[in-house]
Each structure stands twice: as C-alpha cells, then as structure tokens.
Amino acid sequence: MTPPQARSPRARDKRACSLQPPDRAVPQLPRLLQCERMAAAFQRCLSAGSSIEDVRVALVDYRPGSGCSVAYDVVVRGRRQVAVATTGDALRAQAARTDARRAIARALGRDATVARPLTYDVGLGALLHWYPLDLAMPVLARPVPELLRHVARSGIPVDPAAAARPLLYRPGQRAVIRAGDVVFKAYAEHTSFRAGLSGLRIATGLGLGPGPLGALADVRLIARAALDGEPVPRTGAGEMAPVAGAMLRVLHDADLPRLEPMRPRAMLEAAARGAALTASVAPAVARRARHLVARLEEHVPEHGTMVASHGDFNVGALLDLGGALAILDFDEACLAPAGFDVASYAAGVVSGRPGDLERADAALDALLAGYGERPADVDWYLAALLLCRSPRPFRRQERRWSERLEAMVAAAEEVLGR
C-alpha cells in the first residue's frame, strides 16, 4: 500500500467536528477521535528509534450506550499501517477470546517497528492493537509463509512463496488478503463464515462472480481465485448500471429457496438503528431522523414476492474486468422484495455531496433499463437505506461530516415525500 501524504495530526484535529452530547457509557470516544492524542498513544507502542509520522481516523464503529472500535491509518517510517482502539462491549468481547495468547505470540516479531502489538492504555481506557493482530481473527497473525503452507496442505491451490497484501480490513469482523492468484477472506464469526461460503457458491452457480476454491472452517478462512480487474468507482455507477441491472435480473430470477428472508420490517429496524446513531452524534437532526422512521413505519409495504437478492448491491460490489463485470461480496445474500436490491444500488451513490440524489436517480434509471422493469416500493426502500447510511460520514470521519450527515437525512426526506 502506498502511504498517505504525511500530515500533522494536530492539523487534522482542527478540521474535526465536536461530538456531543457525551455518551456516559463510552466517555472515551471524543479522545479516540483526537488524532494528536492517539498519535502519542500509538508512539508508546513502538520500538526505540521509530516514530509516528501521521495518524488519521479511518473507520468508527460506534454503538451508543455500549462501546466503540476505531480504526486508524498510521504512518510509521514512511509505511502505512492499521491500528485499532477498542472500548466498552467491544473490548470485553476481545478480552474473552480464548486464543488471544497464540495470536499475540504470532504477531510479536512480525514488525520490528511495533514493540507492543497489543496493550491496554489506561489514560484512554481502551485496548490498542495493530494489524495483523486481531483477537477475533487470529489467523491474520500467522506468518504468511506458514499460513500459505497450511492452506496448500489442505488442497487449496496456492503458491506457498507468494507475497501477500491486504485488500480490506474491518477490525473484529472480516479481512480480505490477496496472495498470488488467490484471495482469502477471513471472518470473526462462524455465522459470517458460513454466509460468505454460501454467497460464493451462489455467485459461481449463476455465473455472476468467482466461486470458492476451498475453505478452512477451523480458522474461518475462505479462498477464491483472484480476478484481475478494477473496482468500479462511485462516479461510474451510471455507466455500469445497464449491465449491472441485467446481471441483477439473472439473480432475481434464480430459484434459491434456502436463503434467509429479509422482510420490510427488518429493513425498517435497520433504518431505525441508523437513525438512532445519527441522532446520537448529530442532535440537530435527531428529530428529523426519528420522524423519518415514523413515516417509514406508516408506509411499510407488504413483503409480496420474495426473490434471491444480493443483500448489499451497490457499485462497490462490482469489479470491471475490462468490459465485463463480476459481482462480489454475496455475504448478505437473502430472499427479499426485488425493490430492495434495486434501491441499494441507487443508495450507494449518495454520500451527502451536492447533486448526489440527482446522480442516484440517473443511475437508478440506467439500472432499470438493464433490469427490465421497476419493482414495487423502490422509493420506500431507497429512503430507508439512505437513513441506514446516514451515519456513514461520521463513521468515516469525513470532512464536514455533520453537514454531509444532514444532507443524507434530507435526501431520505425528499425520496419519501415523492
């Protein structure tokens, strides 16, 4: 990975929005969002002669009244690394891992710059750990050659000498790593592991994406063939939409009865959770977010015909293979009304920027041209999904996140009022 341009942690803090009101159950959260303070904490983890050059918040997983986990991009000696701070219920879940000692032992010595890959910072009241150490996914801390040899012995075709590089990391949840011509996906929970394996089988069975090469249930690891393509950027959602719509229609027409149902009431509950988080971090829009939930509940549709659904269908799940498309990440595959996936694609275009909703509508029209028809209740699902996504600017600590969060709420209001 190319390290980001070094910037002063103090300069980043000056651009940050204040967080209010304070959460008595997670009083550490404001401190965890102060890059200057976190730089000092991470410096104490390093070996002599190493120094922190840059820190920025990458992802905030905050559960009001419960706990949080914050991931950071940290630059040490010109190299970008990932560090994580965990507190509250997330900390207790990490501490309960019985395989913690093995993970720590394997992580020690992996990186000469990090002397303490796992430590509890008393001043912050948080557990700090550095990738690849993750107590929920101890397989990540294995030396790469050892892991690849273990995988090869299981019959999965992989070059034991291949270099590995991370593609995605969600602390305490999942990670994606490429080694040579194989992509590995690690999971923290067995339920997610089984869903991921089932999703890959669905993708390959319908010719929409790569299938599994093999799986190691004991370490919750799935292997699939790597695809040499380019992720489709959000700006390409409209251009790729007709082909994506045709591929989505293939999925929706498939007979996959064993999938778990995702009914409109479940979508309403997810929207309510998004509204609760938005209200917690941005009290100025709390009333509007709660009112949206009430309006969604008034108009919740009948679930009607359920179709095989991707479950998280957005432009980020598409891979451009030089003219052809593949659909990835079927982990959330379910049975749902057709309008859910269709609305998900449009919702993925909206991030709180000016003109987002117009671009989302254009992408939706292009998607439906490939799909062949407009399913029922698309606007209801789109409004619900926008409310679900409304905390994303805060979770990613984007510039002017409070303004963008408010714009997401306003977009949901506009869609529901159409």
Image (cartoon, rainbow, N blue to C red):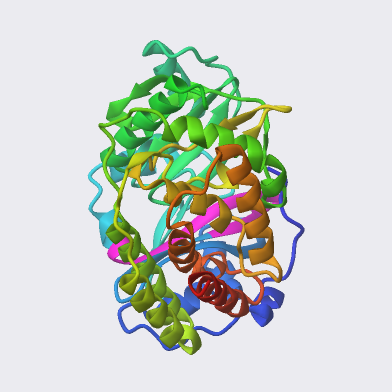
State yes or no: residue 89 in magenta: yes
Q: Position of residue 225 (x, y in %)?
A: 53, 21
Kindly identify the residue that appears in the image at 44 percent across and 59 percent down.
381
Q: Position of residue 256 (x, y in %)?
A: 32, 29
Q: Nearer the viewer, residue 143 or 82?
A: 82
State yes or no: residue 399 in magenta: no
- Total numbered badges shown on the rendered structure: 0
Quarter-of-image position of residue 330: top left
Which residue in the rendered view is the most extreme toward the front? Answer: 373
Image quarter hosting the N terminus:
top right
Residue 47 visible in the picture: no
Q: Which contiguous range is marked in magenta?
A: 72-91
Task: Determine whether 7 is above or below 164 in the image.
Answer: below
Kindly identify the residue that appears in the image at 61 percent across and 45 percent down.
367
Q: Position of residue 409 (x, y in %)?
A: 52, 75
Kindly identify the residue that appears in the image at 68 percent across and 82 percent down.
14
Quarter-of-image position of residue 119: bottom left
Q: Nearer the viewer, residue 395 or 43?
A: 395
